[in-house]
Amino acid sequence: MAVLSLRTEAECGFQSQISIREGIAVAKTSVTAAALKIAEEAAAIAPAVALTSALAGGSFYLYKRLTWTNKAKEIEFKRQFVAHVIKKEQLIVDSTSVNCSKQVEQ
């Protein structure tokens, strides 16, 4: 078994020997304690985060629901229709230009 010598200021020159296995065990214990502390803090914060998210999402849904009037529906329909017509006109223009190119080549 390997032995590691450590000197601390608190020991005032007294040299103690700790085995590597004991040092690893101490390190694991401190890491585990730190992880548990972080998990406890996260568990305490999680309900507040969930509640805040639910309130924000609910508020946004309520806003959208209240503003979705017949006038808003009409405006959205017109916007979608204009986008559809523009897309179809572009297809017609492309088709016509291809046909003209082919006729010129012949």
Image (cartoon, rainbow, N blue to C red):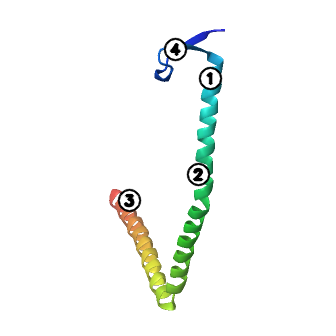
- Pick the front one: 34 or 76: 34
Question: In the rendering, which numbered label is found on residue 41?
Answer: 2
For label 4, the SS is loop
Q: Nearer the viewer, mark 3 or mark 1?
A: 1
- Mark 4 → mark 1, Cα distance in angstroms: 22 Å
Q: Going 36% across and 64% down the picture, which residue do you hit?
A: 97
Q: Going 61% across and 57% down the picture, which residue do you hit?
A: 44
Circle 2 residues within 10 Å: few <14, some 14–19, many ≥20: few
Mark found first going from the N terminus, 3 or 1: 1
Tell whether 8 sits left or right of 37: left
Quarter in which the C terminus is drawn: bottom left
Circle 1 residues within 10 Å: few <14, some 14–19, many ≥20: few
- The residue where tag 3 is placed is 102
- The residue where tag 4 is placed is 14
| Residue found farthest to the bottom | 70
Tell whether 76 sits left or right of 54: left
Percent coordinates x, y for residue 101 in the rendering: 35, 60
Tags 4 and 2 touching, CB below 8 Å: no
- Mark 3 → mark 4, Cα distance in angstroms: 98 Å
Mark found first going from the N terminus, 2 or 1: 1
Mark found first going from the N terminus, 4 or 2: 4
Tags 3 and 4 touching, CB below 8 Å: no
Q: Nearer the viewer, mark 4 or mark 1?
A: 4
Q: Quadrant of residue 45?
A: bottom right
- The residue where tag 1 is placed is 24
Q: Quadrant of residue 5?
A: top right
Q: Going 60% across and 33% down the picture, which residue do you hit?
A: 30
